[in-house]
Image (cartoon, helix red, strand yellow):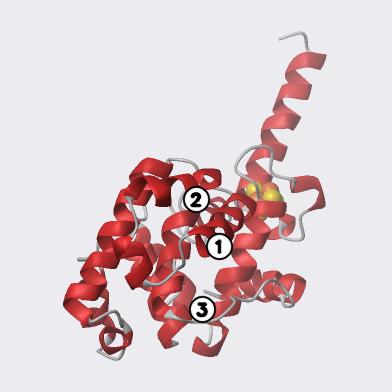
Amino acid sequence: MERTREILRRVLDHYRRGWRPEGSDPFRVLIRTILSQNTSYRNERRAFERLEREVGVDPWSLAEADVEEIASAIRPAGMFRERAARIKEAAQLVLEKYAGDLRGVLEKGFEEAREELMTLPGVGRKTADILLLFSAKKGVIPIDRHINRIAHRTGIVEGNAGYDEVRRRLEEAADEDQYLDIHLALIQFGREVCRARNPRCSECFLRDLCPTFQERQEKNAANEIGAAAGI
Ligand code: SF4
């Protein structure tokens, strides 16, 4: 736990003034999160802006629009046909079930709200948690692919730890009012330093705490000895 605290402290120190979410309207956060799945921040942003301009990001406009129109607007995000169908379906459901306003769901208790959000198309645990954190200030740290990778590499969790275990380990090691900053700072750290491919370990401020870095050092040293011995 102390090591996890120290990791989070350093990441927060480094990225405290990072990107902040623009607005907390739950429907817009939902659409933004659907667009962000498996795409870069830049492409997600472009797709969102085009959707805003060409269709409008509200349940009424999206429920009425043709799927093709939505798909064309969000093309920069990739997988645009599947995402467009999910976005339209989500908009229709939000209109039918909640009269276009998700705030009532977000006011429920954490577990109940999470389960209900996950009945919407394209909404899994991560998206539900993002909505609960960003739009309802609930005490949860959503785990995306960057955060999951960092937690495993730095030994915050081990082996096959799944989504909820990673989330709980991080939450236990931080104060609730830091959750949003931690979520954003870890994503930025994962994009810039602890990247999926070619992590920049030599420049990383977590080297002394990171078992993956230590394993790599030992492996390199063994390879060098092997090469010198002609093995
Ligand atoms: S030392 Fe390397 S693997 Fe470890 S956290 Fe830093 S970038 Fe990631």
Q: Dot 1: what SS?
A: helix
**Amino acid carrying mark 2 in the image:** Ala
Task: Give x and y (percent) for residue 24.
Answer: 49, 82
The mark nearer the N terminus, 2 or 3, is: 2
For the point 78% across and 13% down, the residue is 229
Vertical comparison of 127 with 159: above or below: below
Rendered image: mark on residue 173:
3
For the point 21% across and 68% down, the residue is 93
Q: Residues within 10 Å of mark 3 (few under 14, many from 20)?
A: some
Quadrant in the picture for residue 190: bottom right
Q: Dot 3: what SS?
A: loop
Task: Give x and y (percent) for residue 78.
Answer: 49, 41
Q: Dot 2: what SS?
A: helix
Rendered image: mark on residue 73:
2
Instruction: Give yes or no for contact between labels 2 and 1 (Cβ–Cβ under 8 Å).
Output: yes
Q: Residue furthest top?
A: 230
Vertical comparison of 179 with 219: above or below: below
Horizontally, residue 218 falls left or right of residue 75, namely right
For the point 46% across and 67% down, the residue is 56
Task: Give x and y (percent) for residue 168.
Answer: 39, 72
Is residue 44 or residue 125 the one in the foreground? 44
Asked whether the viewer can see residue 164, the reply is: no
Quadrant in the picture for residue 7: bottom right
The mark nearer the N terminus, 1 or 3, is: 1
Q: Residues within 10 Å of mark 1 (few under 14, many from 20)?
A: few
Rendered image: mark on residue 53:
1
Horizontally, residue 1 falls left or right of residue 116, namely right
**Amino acid carrying mark 3 in the image:** Ala
For the point 45% across and 72% down, the residue is 28
Horizontally, residue 192 falls left or right of residue 46, namely right
Asked whether the viewer can see residue 134, the reply is: yes
